[in-house]
Image: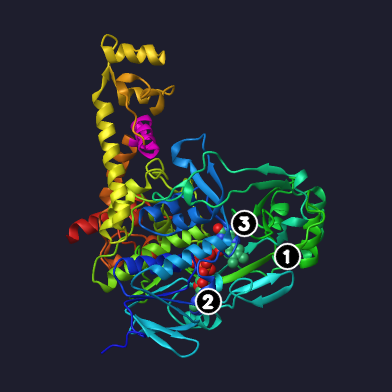
Amino acid sequence: MTDSFHHYDVIVIGGGHAGTEAALASARAGARTLLLTHNIETIGAMSCNPAIGGIGKGHLVREIDALGGVMAKAADAAGIQWRRLNASKGPAVRATRCQADRGLYRAYIRRAVEAQPNLTIFQSAVDDLLIDDDRVRGALTNTGLRFEAPAVVLTAGTFLAGKIHVGDTQYAAGRMGDPPATTLAAKLRERPFVVDRLKTGTPPRIDGRTLDYSVMTEQPGDDPRPVFSFMGSRADHPRQVSCWITHTSERTHDIIRGALDRSPLYSGQIEGTGPRYCPSIEDKVVRFAEKDSHQIFVEPEGLGVSEIYPNGISTSLPFDVQLALVRSIRGFEQAHVTRAGYAIEYDFFDPRGLKDSLETRAVAGLFFAGQINGTTGYEEAAAQGLVAGVNAARLVQEKAAWSPRRDQAYIGVLIDDLITQGTIEPYRMFTSRAEYRLQLREDNADLRLTGVGRELGLVDDARWDAFARKRDAVTAETQRLGALWASPNNSIGRDTVATLGIELSRESSGLDLLRRPELDYAKLTSVAAFAPAVDDPAVAEQIEIEAKYSGYLERQREQIMLAQRNEGMQIPDGFDYDAVRGLSAEVRQKFERVRPQTVGQAQRIPGVTPAAISLLLVHLARAH
Ligand code: FAD
């Protein structure tokens, strides 16, 4: 008889954003799952900025939600200031962001993990993985406990050989206040993984009671407030507060310039590459030397706490310099710094060593997700966690792995970018990374993914019913408007012209009329002939966007169909590239390094020419 305390189907190591989504997805997909993490109190902890979403990242959150994940619901329960970014731009780039109460967010995630059937939590540090014959068998804790499972998901975040820098002080840590995973990192370096170092940083925190808000610009949340989860509502949101905006001064920049020789970034002490799009303040002052001021968002850390997060002054300068630079900022003259800013360097694994399921190629049954794959951000981590978790469960259940395509989800773009191109700096999501971004909108993430989420066992009945109602309402209303024709000499046309004051020179359906820039769904359905309007704004939004952008969307769907021919063409595991006649040594090496799973992936490898793809296609056609 197996001992159920020590034996599971899936073990997830790490209770951060990747680990919690992985554990929840694995358990929901039917696998007996163990979440092993350093500290139960830090499950769902946000290491840095207490905010969820933003451009590209908000898209990931909605996709995680559409697949039954927890992040959007936690954000709804914790969001204290909400914004709809790019609201006046096209629907592809509109994005939701919320400032979150750190404590409420963590509490929600912990409750979700504790309430999940099939999921057990155990607090312990993992010091090694059990691996036999290139196959994972489980995990070994620092107290010598052995937990066994045929699939393991590692999500150790910034903890692997984590090293904190504040000025010339450095010490080992997973993040400020948490121990590093030093033994595990050393053991993993003995395995066949390609390991390198990255770095990230965080600003000092400040007691908000010592700030002068009267000289800052208030930034209240948007009205109406956006909601993250497709199953959420504004009623889920806690009390709302404002954020504030201030700026660095010339004196701030002088202080920083005068202390660059004491910066671990510039002294060569930090070797890892940092996130280009989220630079430290010292980096900004050097790189944008012509600017005499940088914006700082003053963001509350929560409702019941006085600390604030000064977004924009991430730094690893010595503490005395941090204090001086903080106090040179408008409104911060009397600031009391509660925690020092710091940079952290950590080990990550070259993600080109992963399959699209996020299973490692080197060790069967071992999955990697989150920051350890070279990404940065809670959303990027959670998205990978969900995919790794469900695939770990499917591996154990002997089902085929699942990973979304690039035209299906930002999650697909994220994974494909990582496993095909690797990364030399912390990778974060942007809408510009997606070639089919008009299809990959926040508003239709459920229509893109909830069906497949249901098949994977990730979507519960309540979500499925709500989704099916919305999907059917969109179809019905599209058909209704498509079947109503207004012409210059019928009653619908006369009614439309009289109510809306528009010109009507030829016969047009309701959907044709919606394509007119001056019309929207609300205006159209104010015409008696096109009434009644649906009462769900999400259904109305869907119809309006699909109608307005139908030409572009159609063209993009055609491009996707063409691209899918190569995308669907599988390259067998262990394919012998030496047998492909005419391939240059350089391209052959690239193929062998990445080992693409499909011809589509092969053609996205940087430096792979169309000629090389033709040779590959000829060879594959011959082999079949
Ligand atoms: P984490 O959230 O780090 O979670 C890792 C989990 O694994 C933790 O629970 C840890 O206790 C556990 N663990 C680790 N090793 C072991 C072990 N051996 N045994 C058991 N448990 C273990 N992101 C941004 O988008 N923008 C930023 O500006 C930004 N700045 C950051 C600054 C700092 C200082 C830090 C630390 C992070 C920053 N991040 C930033 C990154 C963000 O925090 C991460 O992207 C995100 O938390 C990654 O999620 P994860 O689940 O991969 O790892």
The foreground one among 556 and 441 is 441
**Which one is earlier in the sequence, the residue at label 3 or at label 1?**
3
Tell me if residue 400 comes above or below residue 80 in the rendering. below
Quadrant including the C terminus: bottom left
Q: Residue 537 colored magenta?
A: yes
Q: Name which quarter of the figure residue 362 lies in.
A: bottom left
Residue at the extreme left? 624
In x, y percent, where is residue 214? 77, 44
Q: Which amino acid does label 3 sit on?
A: Leu
Count neighbours of disc 3 (C-alpha within 10 A) and say few if under 14, some if 14 to 19, many if 20 or more: some
Distance between mark 3 and mark 1 Cα atoms? 17 Å
Give the label on residue 338, or none.
Answer: 1
Ligand 1 is within 8 Å of the C-beta of the residue at disc 3: no
Residue picked out by circle 2: 39
Between residue 622 and residue 393, name the one nearer to us.
Answer: 393
Is disc 1 placed on a helix, strand or loop? strand
Q: Is residue 352 visible?
A: no
Beta carbon of the mark 2 residue lies under 8 A of ligand 1: yes
Binning the other alpha carbons within 10 Å of mark 2 as few (below 14), some (14 to 19) or many (20 upward) gives some
Task: Say whether residue 108 is visible.
Answer: yes
Structural crowding at the residue carrying mark 1, measured as other residues with C-alpha within 10 Å and reported as few (<14), some (14–19) or many (≥20): few
Residue range (magenta): 536-553
